Image (cartoon, rainbow, N blue to C red):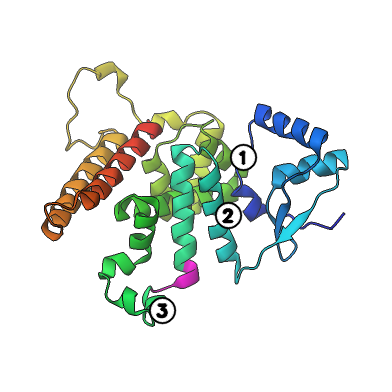
Amino acid sequence: MREIILDDEFRFLLPPLDEQTFRDLEAAILEHGLLVPLVLWEGILIDGYNRYRICTEHNIPFSTVDMEFDSREDVIIWIIENQISRRNLTPMQLSFFRGVHYNTDKKSRGDSSRFTQNDPKAQNEPLEQRSTAGRLAEHYSVSRNTIKRNSKLAAGLTAIGKINSDVQRQILSGEVRVSKNSLEALANASEREVRTFVREIEDGTLVSRVPRDSANVNSAPNMNSDSILPELRQLNDIISGFASEFNSMFQKINSGDSASLKDVLRSYINQLEELYGSL
């Protein structure tokens, strides 16, 4: 068999299958062999870690296909888009993937002017649409603010992974429930603060950092209080951002342009669904 290089960074971007799905895949490969080739880049496995594991454990022959990319960043973006297109991901995983895509794209491309200055069509587009956040917001049908928040969430989860990759995996899979606001706050946190956060997850005390105020469920929340739920703050931000974006869009479109209105509404709905999934 061809020697395969395994890469921890790439492997992490390929969410593990649940036990039953893995066993079903294993049974299918044992019966029919590997029908879908493994995907490699410069000898590194970038798609098919579960299939590779099954084949090596049972000494089953496998085929490979090689893809060409200019950089690791391009590989990461390909993996993300490939995973999003084929899997039913959790809201947390979707947010994480969008954030990694944004952070990777920014690192790879830098200032948007570097890749639009020779594109006449791009030069005629509004600046915000040429930006990384603008392009990805359109690509994923969410708002630019969502992409920016996802960027922070991805940075926070990456910081957690450097300390405890298992905790990082548990958060992404939903085994551990952590508010997105808490993860976003870790983007600019010190290593000591991140270690404290991870330790509280490990010993089960993190819930104390996200007060639910169950004793006062009938009292109306004070929007100016420091004790307000992080989720309510995020909801307030979403509503405020939507109102601003809707008003801006309303000034630009024709009264009969229902498609543009639907795009704005879909972005708003997606953000609310993400928030709902994080509660």
**Helix, strand or loop for disc 1:** helix
Q: Quadrant of residue 132?
A: bottom left
How many neighbours does mark 1 have within 10 angstroms: few (below 14), some (14-19), or many (20 or more)? few
Report x, y in % for residue 180.
39, 41
Mark 3 or mark 1: whose residue is earlier in sequence = 3
Q: Residue at x 75, y 44 (%)?
A: 35
The Cα–Cα distance between marks 2 and 3, rounded to whole angstroms, is 24 Å
Circle number at residue 166: 1
Name the residue that disc number 3 marks. Answer: 114
Amino acid of disc 2? Ile
Position of 64 compared to 142: left or right? Answer: right
- Say if residue 199 shows up in the picture: no
The Cα–Cα distance between marks 3 and 1, rounded to whole angstroms, is 38 Å
**Front one among 24 and 42:** 24
Main SS class of the magenta portion in the image:
helix
Mark 2 or mark 1: whose residue is earlier in sequence = 2
**Helix, strand or loop for disc 3:** helix
**Front one among 181 and 68:** 68
Name the residue that disc number 2 marks. Answer: 79
